[in-house]
Image: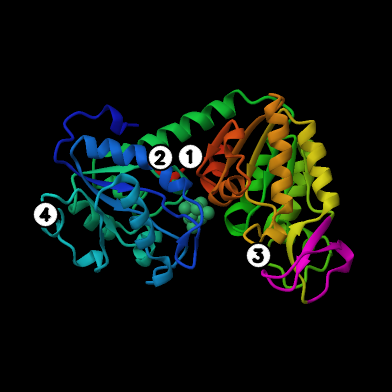
Amino acid sequence: MKYIKNQENLYDKKVLLRLDLNVPLKDGKITDQTRINKILPIINFLIKKKTKILVVSHVGRPKGKINKNLSLEPICKNLEKKINQKIKLIKENILHLKRDDLFNDTKEQIVFLENIRFYEEEEKNDSNFSKHLSKLVDIFVNDAFSCSHRAHASVSKITEFLPSYAGLQLETEINALKKVTTEIQKPVSCIIGGSKISTKIGLIKNLIPKFDNIIIVGAMANNILNHLGNPIGKSVKEDNCGPIIDDIFKTAKNHSCKIFYPEDVVVGKTIEDKAEIKELNNIKNDDLILDIGPKTINKIKNIIEISKTVLWNGPAGYFENPNFASGSYEIAKKIVEKNKNDLIYSVVGGGDTISVLNQINVINNFNFVSTAGGAFLEYLEGKELPGIKALN
Ligand code: 3PG
Ligand code: MG
């Protein structure tokens, strides 16, 4: 892998910089800035080297369609303030852009392309699309470790058309995760939550041989509860997960890995509702499972208590509403308590999980915080991530 930090002669080079600025937005406001703060080093590095920076990122999952709520505009504004420099956001169709349309004002050093997932070619890893992007610049830098599990045009395919380099944050993340996976102390427990069921459920099976305990919370746990015959009302779930879940339990048995899932839950009628604790057999048709219950929280605390390493990705509930944040907060607090006494090595990853930690101000009490969620888990699986493979 070639690292941008070792590169000479960057003066006046046009750099296509892939970032992960997929930050949580509520009514157009950024609710957690961690991912923006983490890319300041690469931006400052490239500014200092006097390059021209063409930033590419996505926000959310617009699925190839323009969606005004998922514009990069608030993110550009936020970054402008942080680096005290003007940023131009290009809203016109990228496919109509030519190299000479960019950076023709000498004062212009940073230009953003609008949300790259407004183009269906991005997720299709489309060759012509990447080729077009490549013509706008001289080199490519991937500083989006947290997107590197996606074989997308601006992450993977693009490397076929440009000299390509690893960015500063990507390097930090890989080095830290490498260290975690090679120096891991047992017993090791993994907590997996969040709402991206389709991304995560398939990879649990591959994590089983590496862990002593796997704790499944968040929306993913709904699938397990449902599969085991519990009603889950109108809770979020993924279809056709039965065989995957059977496989998870069978594999866990073969590897003496214990799988934990909620024993009680907290429900609401809507995501804005107040919380009601419920036993699993008492869930009504109009209930939404939005957090784990107190019995489950206690069980998880006991597992953390006996663990020497804990890895956590994905909140336990709909933490955006404080009524459903207790599960996530209690998990965080228990890890922090152990960490303060150096009794546990803790690694946490993912945009939403970081938001949870920021809400209760404990982000500095973990050994390593990765900006990556899905990529973090796939890395732990031992998979070669498409975006990393493409740089090699
Ligand atoms: C993330 O938030 O994990 C990354 O930005 C990737 O997003 P995705 O899961 O929508 O591909
Ligand atoms: Mg995310």
Q: What is the distance, in whole Å, between disc 2 and disc 3 at their CAs? A: 29 Å
Q: Which residue is mark 2?
A: 389
Q: What is the distance, in whole Å, between disc 2 and disc 4 at their CAs? A: 36 Å
- Any part of residue 223 in sight: no
Q: Amino acid at mark 3?
A: Glu
Q: Earlier in the sequence, mark 2 or mark 4?
A: 4
Callout 4 touching callout 1 (CB < 8 Å): no
Q: Residues within 10 Å of mark 4 (few under 14, many from 20)?
A: few
Membership of 380 in magenta stretch: no
Q: Residues within 10 Å of mark 2 (few under 14, many from 20)?
A: some
Q: Depth-wise, is mark 2 or mark 4 nearer the camera?
A: 4
Q: Position of residue 108 (x, y in %)?
A: 17, 51
Q: Which residues are magenta?
A: 264-285
Q: Which mark is residue 105?
A: 4
Q: What is the distance, in whole Å, between disc 4 and disc 3 at their CAs? A: 49 Å
Q: Earlier in the sequence, mark 1 or mark 2?
A: 1
Which quadrant holds residue 339?
top right
Q: Position of residue 327 (x, y in %)?
A: 74, 51
Q: Amino acid at mark 1?
A: Glu
Q: Earlier in the sequence, mark 4 or mark 3?
A: 4
Callout 4 touching callout 3 (CB < 8 Å): no
Q: Depth-wise, is mark 4 or mark 3 nearer the camera?
A: 4
Q: Quadrant of the C terminus?
A: top left
Callout 3 touching callout 1 (CB < 8 Å): no
